Amino acid sequence: MVEGLGFVDATLAEARRVFALQSAYKWLAKTSSVNERKEHLRRLRDEVVRRSADIEQAIITDLPQPPSRDVPREVGFLCGAIDQTLEELEVWARPVKVEPSADLRGTEPSIVYEARGVCLILGLGISHFICCSNQRWPRWRPVTPR
């Protein structure tokens, strides 16, 4: 551990813990219905809105900027993405019919998109030392200002 940066280890430990919980949950998420997924998104949206003041304070701590007059723009962006997903999820979840190959004539193949159940949200202040790809965590390297 780098002296004075104990929060890095704590943050990585918490990120690993949450990622492990999400990974265990992904099998349930794959079999969830569109309505169940929508309910999860609604609950996530409600929680983000409920904690918008905390989110804004964290953003101000990381990036010195004045407080917003209304909803912090990052909260607005996320809520907009959730709202769009709620509107489009039924269409996105429908199987997509594809043409069968010559060997599979007489069949009706389709692509079925499944929920993943795992996500990683990077905050601006921690994105320079938390990165995840395929459940592999890189070693933390300090970022040297130029």
Image (cartoon, rainbow, N blue to C red):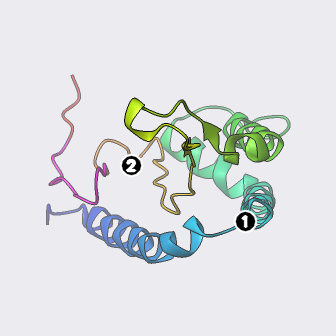
- Amino acid at pointer 2: Ile
Q: Residue at x 49, y 69 (%)?
A: 26
The quarter of the rendered structure image containing the C terminus is top left
Mark yes or no: residue 79 visible: no
Residue receiving disc 2: 126
Label placed on residue 33: 1
Q: Is residue 123 magenta?
A: no
Q: Residues within 10 Å of mark 2 (few under 14, many from 20)?
A: few
**Does the stretch in magenta take in 133?**
yes
Instruction: Locate residue 13, reporting x and y percent.
Output: 32, 72
Observer-nearest of 120 and 75 = 120
70 is higher (above) or lower (below) than 26: above
| Quarter assignment of residue 21 | bottom left
Query: Mark 1 or mark 2: which comes first in sequence?
Result: 1
Q: Which quadrant of the figure has residue 33?
A: bottom right
Q: How far from the left and from the top, in percent, is residue 105?
A: 49, 37
Residue 36 screen position, x and y as percent:
76, 67
* C-alpha distance separating marks 1 and 2: 34 Å
- Left or right for 33, reference 18: right
Q: Which residues are magenta?
A: 131-142
